[in-house]
Amino acid sequence: MSSNATVTVEVGLGDRAYDILIGTGLLLRAGTEISRRLPGTRAAVITDVNVAAAHLETLRAGLEKGGIRPAVIALPAGEKTKSFAHLEEVVDGVLAARLERGDVVVALGGGVIGDLAGFAAGIVRRGMNFVQIPTSLLAQVDSSVGGKTGINSARGKNLVGVFHQPKLVLADTEVLDTLPIREFRAGYAELAKYGLIDRPDFFAWLEENWGKVFAGGPQRTEAIAEACRAKADVVCRDEFETGDRALLNLGHTFGHALEAATRYDSARLVHGEGVAIGMALAYRFSSRLNLASPDDAARVEAHLRTVGLPWRMADIPGELPDAEALLAFIAQDKKVSRGALNFILTRGIGQAFIAKDVPASEVLSFLRENHPGQQNSRPSRPGGRPGQPRGRPGQPRGRPG
């Protein structure tokens, strides 16, 4: 694969099928690609102020090449933007621009902007066209694909939203060069997730090639494309998460509880970091229940630590609520069904499965054992301070993405 090749992954949902384009220079091709699929359309671009500073003018030029002059709505950056107040702001902005149902809402940003803009597109005029242009690694491999949109509530993450599939996803790998290294690592957690769910060969490939993925070039494109294929396969089998799609939540039940426990303070924990810790906890919990080998949990922890991701609750700055409070956050998570605690657990690398009716007493005991402020917290593994990778070739550079 050449470094400038564009890879196309199709999400095969019948008459609602759409393409994910992965490669370089896609911001400048955005207008051409959108107009080819939605001729004569007008657009509103939803973004945040950090992404706008880095990429809005490039996208605007690309849209205008395709004959699209966009209205722009720029929001504050950060998880707290996924709120009712900012949803109202986006909806009002789209209506003020006098866009019609056949026009398009374009999300330019990470997962927060994609989720919020997609939700707005799903409800304005009872459903408008939607295009995802994800600017973070996490969004390119996860949240931009599959049609899940929404906002957070004070009672939990992503509890309000709709399924609303995009018409197109443009994953421009060049924009990842502007990501802060912490954000790139956070997105990498979702990359690793696909290997840990059901693609053990992909996880082994990442163990060998993660440095090249960080450095950019064909390995980065290859990794993103493989993750998108994995997600597309699951979405096509189970679009509305009534079965297999729940497997994509590996690490998320623990991770969402930790995000809620930190009040979505990105200085302490961002989503991908929560997923990383959540995946390590899921593997460790599976080992505790004698479902998987402790060696598998150790292997997952070692890889997360090697790339510089947090892998245990003790890696989160500041104090956490006690185990009982964390269990309460888990019980509120949208992945709980009729009050039963459902988790994605594993029998080994690439052998995730849906575990229903997990006893709350087992979860509580496990949380106590792993809570940094409670008894029997497990000590650090040898081999380096958590969060400090060994040998970080080709880190992405410095501006926000």
Image: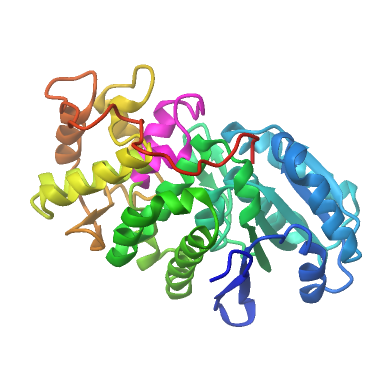
Where residue 28 sits, quadrant-wise, is bottom right
**Farthest residue, direction bottom:** 14
**In this picture, which residue range is highlighted in magenta?**
252-275
Q: Residue at x 65, y 37 (%)?
A: 84
Residue 64, above or below 251: below
Residue 368 in the image, given as x and y percentages of width and height: 18, 28
* Nearer to me, 338 or 205: 205
| 94 relative to 271, above or below | below
Q: Residue at x 30, y 36 (%)?
A: 311
In this view, the residue in front, 383 or 359, is 383
Question: Was residue 264 drawn as part of the magenta stretch in this picture?
Answer: yes
Q: In this view, does 301 lie above or below 2?
A: above
Question: Is the image coloured rainbow, by chain, by secondary structure, or in one colour?
Answer: rainbow
273 relative position to 277: left or right: right
For the point 70% across and 32% down, the residue is 76
Q: Tell me: 327 left or right of 21.
A: left
Say whether residue 264 is left or right of residue 286: right
- Characterize the magenta stretch by its predominant secondary structure: helix
Figure quadrant of the C terminus: top right
> How far across and how far down the image is residue 124, in percent?
75, 55
Can residue 254 be spotted in the picture? no
Q: Is residue 145 magenta?
A: no
State the image coordinates of residue 163 (x, y, percent, origin top left): 57, 60
Q: How many labels does the image show?
A: 0
The residue positioned 28% from the left and 51% from the top of the image is 342
The residue nearer to you, when weighing 257 against 188, is: 188
Res. 266 visible in picture: yes
Q: Specify the quadrant of the image occupied by residue 2.
A: bottom right
